[in-house]
Image (spheres, rainbow, N blue to C red):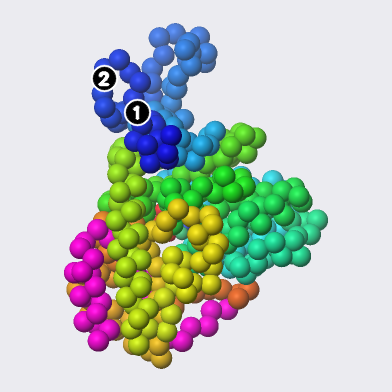
């Protein structure tokens, strides 16, 4: 079955009530009829909510179906999910190689928390590809990827990096939020742990925070262990919304992806735009990799204003009417965000011709969105 079909049918309730959707079980505790049943239930079932009652159990199943994974851990936020993936990938003290484009709060975790666990951090150029081998030492424990980078949209050569990692016994983890697990499957390309913020495209309606991590085989066992140790949990109400979001994910992604690419192409033709950072454009330096590994684009990308500094860029975008100024992306509503204050790179410092602006294209009519942008840029 195509993944779009699996998204509709995976994680449907199996009870004899005939419900189309899994109900929301609001309970910390499921009572057992006897003490023996509490510890050894037959058939196996959960007696405490952290392991996932309905609909979280169904959400896990649906996400496993999407990725072809053996385990899915749910977390209270996307950030918590990425951190759980990192902790699952790092077995002990040593060094982790981290893409210079990682999400800023993940970078903060790497800088401030990993050293306390005896793990040092080396940032690398996201376009490094197989040359990552040169950075691997006896101390290297894991490689953290994010593709494309969520501010500057570099695409990483995942198969090349994962091949090197595997040869050296180094585990890999990715922040896969941009593809929502649907536009590319990192597990098929060799990544051990794939994490995403369900807050973005899967949720799709900007009304909750949640995250998930998936893995296969022995990595799935490792993930399950770390999940238990760290006590991550997702509220069943949020689990319900995430599962509901999954059912319409493919059409929402298709719509915002198509509108995003259209707007990216039109922006590229304007004189005040120095560059449009969208991997679906032929002008993008990683377009070939993108075409090889992705089945389509999400609706989030950036552009660089030509000769307009960050402050003036911020003042400009305040004039937009249909784009809300805000963090996040992947919702039904379009958003705009000035990025310069978030660029914290060290391996390949960012050099822009002017202000870096990120758009998340929502589900509005594309011509209405374009009129708003065109009026501003004129
Ligand atoms: C938003 C985001 C996160 C964090 O997700 P939350 O659900 O907000 O915690 C992680 N990675 C990327 C790339 C994101 O855009």
Which residue sits at x=60%, y=76%?
348
Where the N terminus falls, by quadrant? top left
Q: Which residue is mark 2?
A: 18
Which residue sits at x=58%, y=58%?
145
Q: Along the horizontal axis of the image, is 75 left or right of 315? A: right
Where the C terminus falls, by quadrant? bottom left
The residue positioned farthest toward the right in the image shown:
138
Task: Note whether 278 is above or below 79 in the view shown.
Answer: below
Total number of numbered labels?
Answer: 2
**x, y percent for residue 197:** 43, 51
Disc 1, SS: loop
Which residue sits at x=59%, y=37%?
216
> Local crowd at mark 1 within 10 Å, few (<14), some, or many (≥20)?
some
> Local crowd at mark 2 within 10 Å, few (<14), some, or many (≥20)?
few
Q: Which residue is mark 1?
A: 12
Which residue sits at x=51%, y=47%?
185
Q: Along the horizontal axis of the image, is 177 left or right of 167? A: left
Q: In whole angstroms, how far apart are the C-alphas of marks 1 and 2?
A: 10 Å
- Check if residue 266 falls in the magenta segment: no
Q: Nearer the viewer, residue 203 or 294?
A: 294
Q: Which circle's residue, 1 or 2, is located before the other in the chain? A: 1
Q: Which residues are magenta?
A: 349-378
The image quadrant that residue 273 belongs to is: bottom left
């Amino acid at each position: 079955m195509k993944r779009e079909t699996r998204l509709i049918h995976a994680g449907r309730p199996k009870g004899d009530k005939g419900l189309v959707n899994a109900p929301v079980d609001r309970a910390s505790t499921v009572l057992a009829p006897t003490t023996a049943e509490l510890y050894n239930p037959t058939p196996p079932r959960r007696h405490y909510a952290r392991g996932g009652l309905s609909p979280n159990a169904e959400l896990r199943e649906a996400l496993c179906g999407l990725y072809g994974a053996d385990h899915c851990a749910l977390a209270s936020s996307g950030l918590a999910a990425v951190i759980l993936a990192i902790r699952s990938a790092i077995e002990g003290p040593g060094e982790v190689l981290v893409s210079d484009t990682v999400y800023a709060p993940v970078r903060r975790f790497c800088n401030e928390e990993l050293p306390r666990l005896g793990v040092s951090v080396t940032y690398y150029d996201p376009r490094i590809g197989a040359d990552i081998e040169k950075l691997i030492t006896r101390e290297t424990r894991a490689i953290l990827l994010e593709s494309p980078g969520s501010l500057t949209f570099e695409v990483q050569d995942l198969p090349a990096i994962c091949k090197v990692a595997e040869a050296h016994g180094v585990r890999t983890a990715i922040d896969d939020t941009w593809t929502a697990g649907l536009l590319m499957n990192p597990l098929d390309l060799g990544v051990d742990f794939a994490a995403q913020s369900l807050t973005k495209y899967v949720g799709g309606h900007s009304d909750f925070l949640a995250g998930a991590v998936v893995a296969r085989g022995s990595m799935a066992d490792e993930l399950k262990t770390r999940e238990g140790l760290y006590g991550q949990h997702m509220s069943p109400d949020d689990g319900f919304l995430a599962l509901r979001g999954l059912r319409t994910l493919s059409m929402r992604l298709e719509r915002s992806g198509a509108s995003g690419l259209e707007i990216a192409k039109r922006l590229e033709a304007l004189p005040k735009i120095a560059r449009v950072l969208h991997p679906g454009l032929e002008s993008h330096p990683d377009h070939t990799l993108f075409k090889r590994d992705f089945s389509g684009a999400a609706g989030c990308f950036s552009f660089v204003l030509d000769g307009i500094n960050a402050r003036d860029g911020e003042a400009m975008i305040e004039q937009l009417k249909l784009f809300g100024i805000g963090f996040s992306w992947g919702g039904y509503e379009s958003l705009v965000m000035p990025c310069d204050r978030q660029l914290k790179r060290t391996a390949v410092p960012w050099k822009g011709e002017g202000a870096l602006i990120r758009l998340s294209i929502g589900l509005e009519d594309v011509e209405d969105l374009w009129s708003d942008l065109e009026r501003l840029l004129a």
